[in-house]
Image: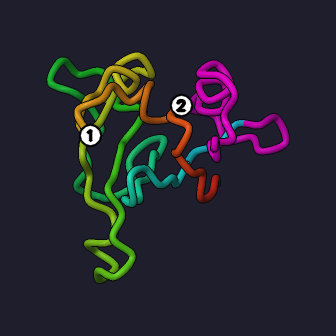
């Protein structure tokens, strides 16, 4: 049974453009559960020690974090990777050895919240 609310990859990508405008369906953060683990996608930097630019000086647009709600506040979100573009994010294979584009569209991926 499909529990994922996203019907298409385009629906997901259109919501994360680097602009926060909930009335237009644009968000900065997405929390989701995949294979019993919780994650957060965040636009921009979340922690003061997160990189703001990649090695080529390009601005980091997205960060992907593993969530641990039982950890102290500093360790609640552990950064997995940072991305300059949506395409970089969609190709990331650090969750279950699958491209993020497949993880976010998997039938069992559950959207926990958006902000």
Q: Is residue 76 left or right of residue 44?
A: left
Above or below for 32 versus 87: below
Nearest the viewer among 58 and 66 is 66
Residue drawn at point x = 63 percent, y = 44 percent: 1
Instruction: Tell which residue pokes out farthest to the front in this image.
Output: 1
Where residue 105 is drawn, which disc sits there? 2
Residue 37's spot in the image, x, y percent?
A: 37, 59
- The quarter of the picture where the C terminus appears is bottom right
Above or below for 71 versus 43: below
Identify the magenta region.
1-25
70 is within the stretch colored magenta: no
Q: In this view, does 61 lie to the left or right of 54?
A: right
Residue 80's spot in the image, x, y percent?
A: 24, 46
Q: Magenta stretch mostly in which secondary structure? A: loop
Dot 2: element: helix
State the count of labels.
2
Above or below for 45 versus 77: above
Where residue 96 is drawn, which disc sits there? 1
7 is within the stretch colored magenta: yes
Residue drawn at point x = 15 percent, y = 24 percent: 55
Dot 1: element: loop
Which one is earlier in the sequence, the residue at label 1 or at label 2? 1
Above or below for 77 versus 93: below
Nearest the viewer among 57 and 102 is 102
Q: Distance between the residues labelled 1 and 2?
A: 14 Å
Residue drawn at point x = 70 percent, y = 36 percent: 26
Nearest the viewer among 3 and 59 is 3
């Amino acid at each position: 049974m499909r529990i994922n609310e996203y019907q298409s990859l385009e629906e997901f990508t259109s919501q994360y453009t680097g602009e926060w405008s909930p009335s237009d369906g644009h968000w900065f953060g997405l929390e989701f559960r995949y294979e019993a683990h919780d994650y957060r996608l965040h636009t921009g930097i979340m922690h003061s020690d997160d990189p703001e630019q990649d090695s080529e000086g390009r601005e980091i647009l997205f960060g992907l974090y593993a969530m641990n709600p039982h950890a102290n506040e500093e360790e609640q979100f552990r950064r997995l990777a940072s991305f300059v573009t949506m395409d970089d994010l969609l190709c990331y294979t650090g969750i279950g050895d699958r491209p993020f584009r497949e993880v976010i569209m998997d039938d069992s991926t559950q959207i926990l919240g958006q902000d």
